[in-house]
Amino acid sequence: MNAIRPKKRFGQHFLKDRQYIKVILDAARLSTDDVVLEIGPGTGVLTGELVTRAGHVVAVEIDRELAAFLKERFASFSNLEVICADILTLSLTDILGFAIKKGRRCKVVANLPYYITTPVIAALLNKRELFELLVVMVQEEVADRMVAQPGTKEYGAFSIMVQFYSEAEVMAHVPRGAFHPVPKVNSAVVRLKLRARPAVSVVSEAVFFDVVRAGFGKRRKMLRNALLGSDLGLCPGRVDKAFDIAGIPPTRRAEQLTLEEFGRLADALICGCLKGDNN
C-alpha cells in the first residue's frame, strides 16, 4: 500500500514518538483479560502494542483507507476487530456487548482525533457502565479542563461531568513535535478511572446537570441570575429558597461552586418543586 497521507478533514495527527506510547500503555496496565476499544487508530502505531497485550481489541477508524491498511497490516492477529465507522454514530453497547455478556468492562486506549475529543469523551461517560478505565491522548487545553478546579478559567460543565463520573489524572504532557504532521497545539495523556458511583450523591443526575449547564451558560453572571435567565422555567421564590436550603450565597458564580455544592443546590431545587413551592 502506498504511503498514508494524513487527512485534515479527519483531524489526523499520527503519534511518532514512542516514549509517549509507553506512557499510554503504562497508564492502561493491560492484561490478556482486557477488552480494549481504540478510537482513531491511524496507522496502527498504538494498535500494534495493544494487540500483543490485550485479549481483544476493537479499533474504530473513520478513514476507509486507514481501516483497510490496518486490516492488512494486522491480518495475523485474530484478537483485532477493525470497524470502519464514525465512533459517534456507533452503538457502543452493540460493538462491546460481547464483553459485557462475559461480565467484563472494557478499557478505552486511544490517541483521540482532535476534532471530536469532547463529544467522544461525553459519549463514553454516558455509557460508563461499559468501561472501567479510559486512557486518552487529547489536546492540552482539553486535559486542563478535565482536571480543572473551581475558581479557574478552565473549570466548566465539561470539568464537572468528567469529575462526577471519574477520577481524572494527567499522566504526561506531550509536545507538538511528537506528532506528524505537527499540530498547532500541545497534547496530554489523561487517565480516567470510572467511579463505582458518582462523586456526589444527588436526587436526580438530570437535574444536577441541568443546573450545571444553566450556571455555566452565563458564567459571568451571578448563579441566581443565570438560573433565572435559563430555560429551566424557575421562579425567583423557588430559586431563592433553594439557595437558602443549600447554604450557598446567590451572588456566587457557577465557576466558584464545587461538585458537592452544585449537588446541594440541585437537590434543594427538587425539594422545592416536590413541596409545590414554585412561587
Image (tube, rainbow, N blue to C red):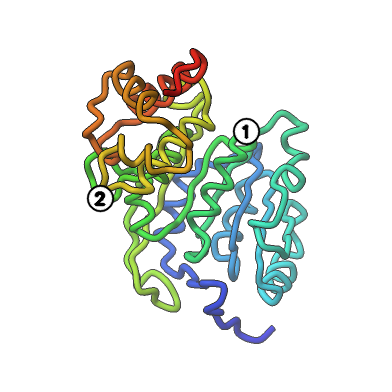
Q: Compared with residue 62, is residue 222 higher up or lower down, i.e. above or below?
A: above
| SS at circle 2 | loop
Residue in the picture at 62% in, 33% down: 129
Task: Pick the quarter of the image with the N terminus.
Answer: bottom right
Q: Quadrant of residue 191?
A: top left
Q: Earlier in the sequence, mark 1 or mark 2?
A: 1
Residue in the picture at 55% in, 41% down: 125
Identified by mark 1, the residue type is: Glu
Identified by mark 2, the residue type is: Lys
Q: Residue pushed farthest top?
A: 275
Q: Position of residue 273 (x, y in %)?
A: 49, 20
Residue located beneath label 1 in the image? 129
Q: Position of residue 181 (x, y in %)?
A: 44, 78
Residue located beneath label 2 in the image? 153
Residue in the picture at 41% in, 42% down: 214
Front-lying residue, 70 or 32:
70
Q: How many marks?
A: 2
The answer to whether 91 appears left or right of 169 in the picture is right
Residues at badges 1 and 2 in contact (C-beta under 8 Å)? no
Labelled disc at residue 258? none
| SS at circle 1 | helix
Residue in the picture at 56% in, 35% down: 132
Q: Give how far apart the Cα atoms at labels 1 and 2 are.
A: 31 Å
Q: Compared with residue 18, is residue 98 higher up or lower down, i.e. above or below?
A: above
